[in-house]
Image (tube, rainbow, N blue to C red):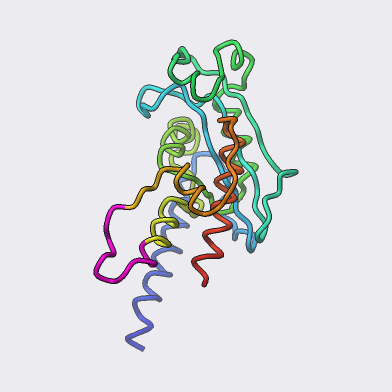
């Protein structure tokens, strides 16, 4: 009985915390995000931004795609251009090739994240350096909901680290591992796409997620 108690307490805590979040949700239309997620389904997201400063920069493009089982459902994807209220830096244009002209007719940020939340539903969210993308998105979501996205979060770079670390001799584990995206993709034997945009990055991240799930199960 004593061995089961910690697990029971954790489950009870998660249940109470979930109910607290639902009670304090700023917009009841998004209660569906707390539903039980569909089995073996995930949503991979990626954002392009005006820069890398979470406090000052803004999202200008969102790409999201569903994964069901071990398949990327490219027919079930979401691509959104978002209109920022600040300039798109020249440095960021070199990366994602989105100019101010390209995003001038984009959606307002609140409409864009509303569409994203509807698309994600209650599915776990997958990403590469997801903390940055969520940090950018939460700047818009928090004023709407009074909280961030509640879904489970899965970080692909952490999965890769776990996989690489498990292959090392015990006395070498815990050392620095190259987590750069190009390195990760090459090491996993996965193709990369030259075009650097939110949807391409989401699809590539999805490929890495599927491959790493397979490798970590072995």
Q: Residue at x 43, y 18 (%)?
A: 91
x%, y% of residue 135? Answer: 41, 36
* In the rendered image, the vertical position of residue 163 relative to residue 55, given as above or below: below
Does the magenta run of residues contain 166?
A: yes
Residue that sits furthest to the bottom in the current view: 1
The number of numbered badges drawn on the structure is 0
x%, y% of residue 125? Answer: 53, 49
Drawn side of residue 71 relative to residue 49, left or right: right
- In-front residue for pair 65/84: 65
Residue that sits furthest to the left in the current view: 171
Drawn side of residue 102 relative to residue 129, left or right: right
Drawn side of residue 52 relative to residue 112, left or right: left
In the rendered image, which quarter is residue 142 located in? top left
- In-front residue for pair 91/10: 91
* In the rendered image, the vertical position of residue 151 relative to residue 168, given as above or below: above
Query: Which stretch is magenta?
Result: 165-176
x%, y% of residue 205? Answer: 55, 46
Does the magenta run of residues contain 50?
A: no
Q: Quadrant of the N terminus?
A: bottom left
* In the rendered image, the vertical position of residue 58 relative to residue 128, given as above or below: above
Drawn side of residue 49 relative to residue 193, left or right: left
* In the rendered image, the vertical position of residue 7 relative to residue 177, given as above or below: below
x%, y% of residue 30? Answer: 58, 44
Q: Residue at x 57, y 23 (%)?
A: 82
Residue that sits furthest to the right in the current view: 75
């Amino acid at each position: 009985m004593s061995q089961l108690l910690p697990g029971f307490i954790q489950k009870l805590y998660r249940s109470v915390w979930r109910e607290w979040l639902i009670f304090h949700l700023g917009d009841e239309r998004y209660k569906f995000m707390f539903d039980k997620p569909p089995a073996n389904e995930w949503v991979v997201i990626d954002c392009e931004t005006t820069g890398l400063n979470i406090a000052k920069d803004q999202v200008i493009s969102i790409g999201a795609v569903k994964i069901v089982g071990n398949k990327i459902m490219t027919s079930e994807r979401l691509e959104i251009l978002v209109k920022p209220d600040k300039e798109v830096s020249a440095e960021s244009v070199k990366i994602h090739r989105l100019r101010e002209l390209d995003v001038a007719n984009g959606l307002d940020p609140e409409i864009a994240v509303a569409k994203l939340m509807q698309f994600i539903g209650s599915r776990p969210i997958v990403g590469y350096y997801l903390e940055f993308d969520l940090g950018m998105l939460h700047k818009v979501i928090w004023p709407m909901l009074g909280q961030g996205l509640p879904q489970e979060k899965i970080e692909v770079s952490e999965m890769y680290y776990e996989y690489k670390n498990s292959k090392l001799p015990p006395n070498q584990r815990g050392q620095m591992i190259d987590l750069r995206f190009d390195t990760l993709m090459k090491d996993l034997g996965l193709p990369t796409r030259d075009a650097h945009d939110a949807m391409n990055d989401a699809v590539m991240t999805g490929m890495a997620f599927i491959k790493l799930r397979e490798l970590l199960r072995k």
